[in-house]
Image: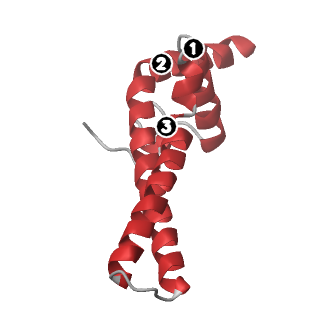
Amino acid sequence: MQLHLTYAHLPQLAVLPPPVRVLVRQRALAMMPSHGRLIGELPVIFSVVGGLLGAFAGAWTASLLHSGSAGPDEITIVCNVIGVGVCGFVCGFVGMQLQVRKLRPYLSKAVEYYVSEITHAD
């Protein structure tokens, strides 16, 4: 499985300008069956879940660093922020990869639709 850092790295979208990429991606999401709305929000859902997990992981890490004693609140805050940021980013990236995997068949159809619209617009 290839990892795509952005939608611009997808072969179907690489040749298109950035504003058109957004339109084609939205068109591909609209072409999906009824679960397309959930697939469209997958990176956001994964980021939120990852952020919550990161908050708990940060609190757990802070409690390990304090080793049971009452410590400064700054350590707790820093651990929570790092946990939320790292886990939210990683889970959002995983959500984007899953979204791309589900969208790939529809992207080709959306690009074909976009090209046919341009050629018939004249």
Q: Residue furthest left?
A: 1
Vertical relation: 87 (above or below) 113? below
Front-most of 121 and 69? 69
Quadrant containing the C terminus in the rendered view:
top right
Q: Earlier in the sequence, mark 3 or mark 2?
A: 3
| Residue at image coords 49%, 46% | 49
The amino acid beneath tag 3 is Val
Of badges 3 and 2, the one in the foreground is 2
Residue 93 spot, x, y in % from top left:
42, 48
Q: What residue is pinned by disc 3? A: 15
Residue situated furthest right in the rendering: 122
Tell me the quarter of the image containing the N terminus. top left
Dot 1 falls on a residue whose secondary structure is: helix
Q: Which residue is mark 2?
A: 106
Q: Quadrant of residue 103?
A: top left
> Around disc 2, counting alpha carbons within 10 Å, would you say few (fewer than 14), some (14 to 19), or many (20 or more)?
some
Q: Is the residue 29 above or below the residue 80 in the image? A: above
